[in-house]
Image (cartoon, rainbow, N blue to C red):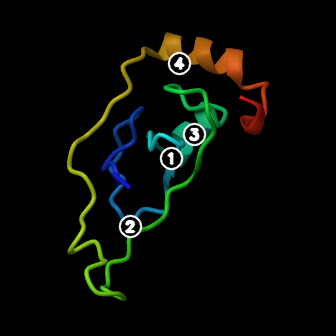
């Protein structure tokens, strides 16, 4: 998992330990506030969101920890304007995520 470091809409920091990060199936990453604002519609693909897992800080198994496999440092931002986000969300939000 890429573990993007920020919300793609509001740019708030979402480190690998954040419980406030949510991802879609393509790993688009948004904070809880933006997922709520977007009515659980990923503005990039139209899918829904799930809480992003937290990457363990401690090496519980050899080679597996945030120290050895850190999250990405590349910040990603949605290419859409707020008006485009609103229009897209309005089209999709009435369809349950499993039926999108």
- Which residue occupies 51% across, 11% down? 84
Residue at mark 4:
85
Residue farthest toward the front in the current orientation of the protein: 62
Which element carries disc 2, helix, strand or loop? loop
Q: Earlier in the sequence, mark 2 or mark 3?
A: 2
For this rendering, which residue is in front, 95 or 31? 95
Position of residue 14 in the picture relative to residue 47 (left or right): left
Where is mark 3, residue-wise? 35
Q: Which mark is residue 97?
A: none
Residue under numbered circle 1: 23
> Is label 2 or label 1 in front?
1
Question: N-terminal of the two: label 2 or label 4?
Answer: 2
Label 3 Cα neighbours within 10 Å, binned few <14 / some 14-19 / many ≥20? many
- Point out the tag, 3 or 4, that comes first from the N-terminus: 3
Instruction: Tell me residue 32's x, y (percent).
Output: 55, 47
Q: Residue at x 35, y 87 (%)?
A: 61
Question: Mark 3 or mark 1, which is nearer to you?
Answer: 1
Give the residue displayed 42% in from the left and 62% down from the top.
Answer: 18
How far is mark 3 from mark 4, CA to CA?
Answer: 12 Å
Relative to residue 28, is residue 46 depicted above or below? above
Q: Which residue was labeled with disc 2? A: 17
> Going by the image, does 89 lie left or right of 82?
right
Mark 4 or 1, closer to the camera: 1
Q: Are marks 2 and 3 in contact (CB under 8 Å)?
A: no
Where does residue 51 sit, x and y in percent of width and height?
Answer: 56, 56
* In-front residue for pair 49/20: 49
Q: Earlier in the sequence, mark 3 or mark 1?
A: 1
Secondary-structure class at tag 1: strand
């Amino acid at each position: 998992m890429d573990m993007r470091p920020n919300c793609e809409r509001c740019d708030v920091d979402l480190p690998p330990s954040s419980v406030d990060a949510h991802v879609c199936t393509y790993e688009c990453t948004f904070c809880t506030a933006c997922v709520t604002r977007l009515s659980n519609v990923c503005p990039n693909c139209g899918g829904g969101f799930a809480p992003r897992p937290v990457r363990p800080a401690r090496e519980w198994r050899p080679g597996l920890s945030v120290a050895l496999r850190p999250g990405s440092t590349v910040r990603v931002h949605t290419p859409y304007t707020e008006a485009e986000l609103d229009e897209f969300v309005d089209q999709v939000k009435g369809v349950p995520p499993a039926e999108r």
